[in-house]
Amino acid sequence: MSRATALAWLTAALLTLAPAAALAAECPRTSLADIEDEVMCPVCGTALGIAGAPQAKRERELIKSLVAKCMTKEEIKDRLVAEFGPRVLALPARKGFDLAVYVVPIAALLLGLVGLGLALPRWRRRRAAGIAPVSDGEAFPEADARRLADDLARYDL
Amino acid sequence: MRAGPITALIAAAALVGLLTYGVSTSGSDTTLDEALARDERPAAPDRRLPVLGRDETGSLAEHRGTVVVLNFWASWCVPCRDEAPLLQRIHERIAERGGTVLGVTYNDASRDALAFVKEFGNSYPSLRDVEGELYRAYGNVGVPETFVIDRRGRIAAIFRGPVQRAPLERALAPVLAEPR
């Protein structure tokens, strides 16, 4: 075998083995612990991480087998959705009634901000209006002055 | 009335409406049971779903003209294990008279469901209700649940919970005797 032929064989072998070696180096790409707090045990109705039912055990075994196949976290979650439907994801879906989980807090926050935006200037105006007579140096109402004098007279200071 | 209280009232009403909607949609649907109680045969809900163990989809409509024993099951469900041999025997018996058992898996991984089918030697097909749409359409509250569907695609009997041989055979007899 000539040197050129040997070099070609070596290059071909390296090209073939390199992706597999790279894959092996990256594998596993995720872990059960990394996934089980982001998915549900659909039968138990709780997060998989805290579920102890036999069904949860089976789901964990399925995840472990997918981890062993070197699948990424997202790939495994996609596979779980294909097996159990979107309800397997711990976060509610962003459609239908579940959308309310995301929309209601934002809407409430916006509504609160709008309310504050409307109310604050009014409060300021009212407060300013309440202080103005005194700060403007207007005459102290006579009735109030008399009452104040009477009150002070009652105290032996 | 000022704008503040009106806004608060609208927000509160919207919140109550949202809660009412959530509660009303999360309960089980008893429409089918009520129709049967009135001696009616309601149309059997149908969806096109993946067939367990095959790279294809199937539906109840494909069995129109045959009597179908529709059984919702899961490999993790203990009563489903108890009734699996009975359903296989029923399937073999009614197949000669133009009937079939059609399984629907619910909340089950396909590999577990396939292992279950292999273990009990069930020869009837099963659909995979991954999203639980068909399950909800039948007003199910758990598994197993079994429905006898006549040749015209209408529900003739409902068995909520595990099914027993005698009641199932009693429900099947008149439906199988109906003209094709």
Image (cartoon, rainbow, N blue to C red):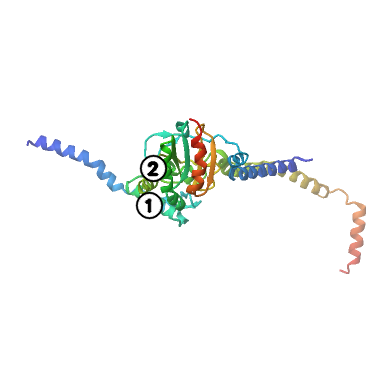
Residue B112 percent across, percent down from the top left: 39, 48
Q: Is residue B43 above or below residue B33?
A: above
Q: Are marks 1 and 2 on the same chain?
A: yes
Q: Residues within 10 Å of mark 2 (few under 14, many from 20)?
A: few
Estimate the spatial distance between the alpha carbons at disc 1 and disc 2, rounded to whole Å. Answer: 16 Å
Quarter of the N terminus of chain B within the rendering: top right
Q: Amino acid at mark 1?
A: Glu
Relative depth, front residue between A141 and B18: B18
Q: Which mark is residue B32?
A: none
Point out the frontmost of discs 1 and 2.
1
Give the residue at x 32% y 49%. A68
**In which chain is the residue bearing label 1?**
A
Residue beneath disc 1: A61
Give the residue at x 91% y 60%. A149
- The number of discs equals 2
Residue beneath disc 2: A75
Residue A33 percent across, percent down from the top left: 41, 54
Which secondary structure lies at badge 1? Answer: helix
